[in-house]
Amino acid sequence: MREIKSEFGKGFIYNLVLFAKHYERMQSYLETNNKMAESNPDLWTKGDIDLWFNGAGDHLIELEIPTQFRNIKIGIMAKELQDEVIERRLGKSTMKDGEDFFKKLEKLCRMIDKKLGVDSIEATWN
């Protein structure tokens, strides 16, 4: 049987993890963007991480929100994050926008834990 593949993955938790794996690259994308802004300020703005949202955001395009979560806070928040990533791919985003996005993502993950009966505890080292 031939295995079905997806370039950026398809799933719920799986795709959230794939997106989160890009976190460490945010600073690198900012540096690249700043270099491009120096050489071509008409096309690029210093301090933007648009390229990062474009790369990481690919994993949220096929985010599949499970039926049991669609009309509750978890599904609503997941859809909001998915919509925000699409919007940020088209606009100007700063490091603060990226950090704020990850705070929302962490909140979503803790909501999922709670729904699954896991009492997550916020990490001191985060």
Image: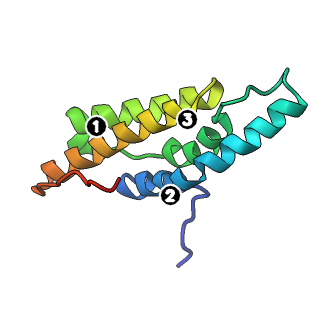
Foreground: disc 3 or disc 2: 3
Q: Residue at x 46, y 53 (%)?
A: 20
* Mark 1 vs 2, N-terminal side: 2
Q: What residue is disc 3 on?
A: 95
Q: Residue furthest top?
A: 42
Marks 1,2: beta carbons within 8 A:
no
Give, as a three-letter code, the residue at label 1.
Answer: Gly
Q: Is residue 58 above or below residue 43?
A: below
The numbered mark at residue 75 is 1
Q: Which residue extends farthest front? A: 124
Q: In the image shown, does 2 or 12 lie closer to the viewer?
A: 12
Q: Is residue 122 left or right of residue 48?
A: left
Image x and y of residue 108, in percent: 29, 42
Q: In this view of the protein, which residue sits in the foreground, 53 or 78?
A: 53
Residue density around tag 3, few if under 14, some if 14–19, many if 20 or more, within 10 Å: some
Location of residue 111 (image quadrant):
top left
Q: Earlier in the sequence, mark 3 or mark 1?
A: 1
Determine whether the residue tagged by mark 1 lies in a helix, strand or loop: helix
Q: Amino acid at mark 3?
A: Met
Mark 3 vs 1: CB contact within 8 A: no
Task: Pick out the residue farthest to the right.
Answer: 39
Q: Is residue 126 above or below residue 3?
A: above
Numbered disc 2: secondary structure: loop
Q: CA distance from mark 1 to mark 2?
A: 21 Å
Choose mark 1 or mark 2, whichever is in front: 2
